[in-house]
Image: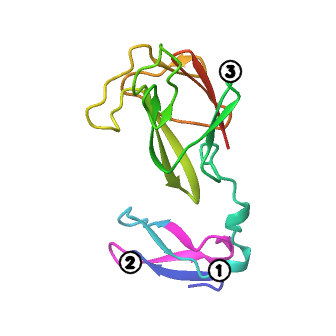
């Protein structure tokens, strides 16, 4: 093999592949290859990988649905903040986050599941209670940004999303 080439054996058929070393990136620890003989796709360690050039995880942008800390809900009319906790949070007239003054809200109206994810948290909204045994859909519905949440929907919440349950409007805050 010529200079500047690596000899990498296929992980399926064992035949040696010729890989141009100068074309390999320096910031990726594993490289994907495809054998021209058996068409098997495999990964092999990148000999040019330099850990110093890898992206710093602190500066890698997280998806929009990942909160750095557990979010809170802001009741718009009441000017009141409701902190969520990790795990299932029930919202309703008799929920963990209770709104007893709203007669249009079900006893347990909807669920917010706060889950650890990618070094932060994600929040999954469910109207029908499929996350809680024995739960049923709310009769007046749950609305996310003006759109009714379907009975089997599980939706990821973003910062500044608006929830409407009964006649109560809530804003998702980071």
Q: CA distance from mark 2 to mark 3?
A: 69 Å
Residue at horizontal 58 percent and vertical 20 percent from the top:
168
Q: Nearer the viewer, mark 1 or mark 2?
A: 1
Q: Which mark is residue 48?
A: 1
Location of mark 2 (residue): 15
| The residue stretch that appears in magenta | 11-32
Quick check: can you spot residue 126? no
**Which of pointers 2 and 3 indicates the residue nearer the eye?**
3
Which quadrant does the C terminus fall into? top right
Let me know if residue 23 is in the magenta part. Answer: yes
Task: Please tell me whether mark 1 or mark 3 is closer to you in this view.
Answer: 3
Q: In the rendered image of this protein, does residue 12 appear above or below residue 75?
A: below
Q: Residues within 10 Å of mark 2 (few under 14, many from 20)?
A: some
Q: Measure how far apart labels 1 and 2 are at the Cα level.
A: 22 Å
Which of the 4 image quarters holds residue 40? Answer: bottom left
Disc 1: CA contacts within 10 A as few (<14), some (14-19) or many (>=20): some
Residue that carries the numbered disc 3 in the rendered image: 77
């Amino acid at each position: 093999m010529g200079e500047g080439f690596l000899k990498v054996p296929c992980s399926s058929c064992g035949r040696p592949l010729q890989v141009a070393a100068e074309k390999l990136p320096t910031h990726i620890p594993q490289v994907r290859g495809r054998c021209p003989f058996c068409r098997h796709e495999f990964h092999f360690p990148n000999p040019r990988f330099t850990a110093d050039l890898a992206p710093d995880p602190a500066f890698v942008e997280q998806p929009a649905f990942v909160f750095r800390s557990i979010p809170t809900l802001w009741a718009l009319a009441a000017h009141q903040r409701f902190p969520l906790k990790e795990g299932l949070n029930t919202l309703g007239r008799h929920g963990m986050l209770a709104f007893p003054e709203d007669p249009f809200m079900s006893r347990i109206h909807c669920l917010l599941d706060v889950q650890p994810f990618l070094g932060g948290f994600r929040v999954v909204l469910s109207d029908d209670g499929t996350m809680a045994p024995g739960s049923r859909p709310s009769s007046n519905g749950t609305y996310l940004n003006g759109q009714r949440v379907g009975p089997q929907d599980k939706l990821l919440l973003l910062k500044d999303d608006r929830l409407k349950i009964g006649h109560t409007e809530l804003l998702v805050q980071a």
